[in-house]
Amino acid sequence: MRVCTYAAKQALLGQNVQVINCEEMVVSGKKNPIIENYTRRIDRKAPNKGPYLYRRPDMFVRRTIRGMLPFKRSRGREAYKNVICHVGVPPELKDSKAVVFEDTKMEKLKTADTLKLKEICGRIGAR
């Protein structure tokens, strides 16, 4: 999820970051090991104790971005407040310009093993 690293860097620079279409993000790798990893992490947790793993795609992405920030420092917490993730495109952002990640590596991803985030979240319990 290259979008998350870009969003984390922009948030650290003081920009307000809004990530749209979180459910359409692509995770590269083989399908079964990725899903098994997340289901094992959810099954491992004790009730009423962490770690808390989000099942909604927007919160899943936001938590991933948080892991890329120095959250234990005030700089990281302030940057995290600037990150907003959306499922789909909200009406107030339809007319604004979005940064599109078109790269030469995207052609390789189309042929490689990939998995969309909505599939992962659906398998771990999202509604």
Image: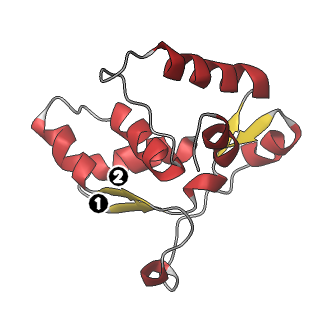
Taking depth in this image into account, of 65 and 5 the one nearest to the observer is 65
Image quadrant in which you'd find residue 52: top left
For the point 60% across and 63% down, the residue is 100
State the residue position of label 1: 15
Q: On screen, 19 above or below 37? A: below
Name which quarter of the figure residue 126 lies in.
top right
Q: Give the x, y percent position of residue 59.
A: 43, 47
Q: Position of residue 29 (x, y in %)?
A: 73, 27
Q: Position of residue 32 (x, y in %)?
A: 77, 23
Q: Specify the label residue 35 is tagged with.
A: none
User: Could you tell me which secondary element the residue under label 2 belongs to?
Assistant: helix
Q: How many marks?
A: 2
Residue located 65% across and 43% down the image: 122
The answer to whether the residue labelled 2 contacts the one labelled 1, judged by CB atoms less than 8 Å apart, is: yes
Q: Residue furthest front?
A: 47
Q: Are there few (<14), some (14-19), or many (20+) residues within 10 Å of tag 1?
A: some
Label 2 is placed on what type of residue?
Gln
Q: Amino acid at mark 1?
A: Gln
Q: Which residue is mark 2?
A: 10
Q: CA distance from mark 2 to mark 1?
A: 5 Å
The front one of 118 and 95 is 118
